[in-house]
Amino acid sequence: MIEWLLSLLNTSPSEFVLCLEFIFLFLFLSLFSYFFKEVGVYLFIAITMIVANLQVLKIVEFSFYPEPIALGKMAICFTFLGSDILAECFGKKSAFKGVYIGFTANIFLIFLMLITIGYPPANVSSLNLHQNLKTVFTPTLSIFIAGGVTFIISQILDITIFLKIKEKFTKQTVWIRSFISTSISSLIDNILFYTFALYIFNSFVDFDTLVYSYILGTLIFRLIIIFFSSFIIVFIKKIINCRP
């Protein structure tokens, strides 16, 4: 069943899989928020951040952009949306708490997987799985570190801008606040993360690829996602009876 599903997705256009991921994230953010309220959003942010740092290892092509684009931006955009929901419905303290929980979960995964890889494989048959784990997690240590630090900086910036706009303008413009704050913080996130993770720490890419495929390419990609996801916060506010 899983192999059939993967085969179906692999032969589908990347845009279709992108829409599927958007729907999946929207659905589970809604479910987490509805059933678990504040705690559910914390959980969603932590899981989604970890997934985003794994997705960034995969490069795909989309028809709307000439250069290959690193994945992970859909997931990371939804972590910003989660922070905005916490700031809007539960306050600044809860929003910052969500950021710290996401960062801590990221660090926890790094060290737990390093310990896991540290166990010697029992036999030859388990050696392939051991090597697969090393391939996925060992070279991504710098990516996880860069992702964690960048996550804190950009998320705090997002929450601060979101709440500052709320102080100055009407509270009814929640989706506009979410779009503006997430767009600005996403630019900072892109510049910091990709520069450190792929250019300074690892030298995985040349400067032109860094700028056009990663920083600018994924920024355009993120802005499209941010625009549509910004409306989700209006829906989430209604289903959890948010009246800050």
Image (cartoon, helix red, strand yellow):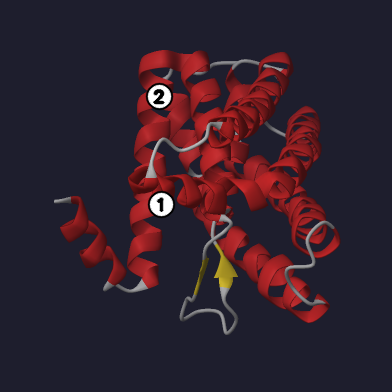
Q: Is residue 32 left or right of residue 54?
A: left
Can you identify the residue that label 2 sits on? 32
Position in image of residue 200 (x %, y %): 86, 60
Does residue 211 show up?
Answer: yes
Does residue 171 appear in this view? no
Label 1 crowd (10 A; few <14 / some 14-19 / many >=20): few
Left or right: 193 as drawn, with respect to 88: right
| Position above or below: 32 against 28 | above
Dot 2: what SS? helix
Q: In the orientation shown, which residue stands out farthest toward the front? A: 123
Q: In the rendering, which numbered label is found on residue 167?
A: none
Q: Position of residue 191 (x, y in %)?
A: 80, 58
Q: Classify residue 181 by image quadrant.
A: top right
Q: Residue at x 73, y 31 (%)?
A: 166
* Residue in the picture at 72% in, 39% down: 151
Q: Is residue 13 above or below residue 176?
A: below
Farthest-out residue, right = 200
Question: Which residue is at a point 39% across and 52% down the rendered structure image?
Answer: 21
Specify which label sits upstream in the sequence, 1 or 2: 2
**Which residue: 21% across, 65% down?**
8
Residue 102, how many percent across, how many down?
63, 28
**Callout 2 amino acid:** Phe
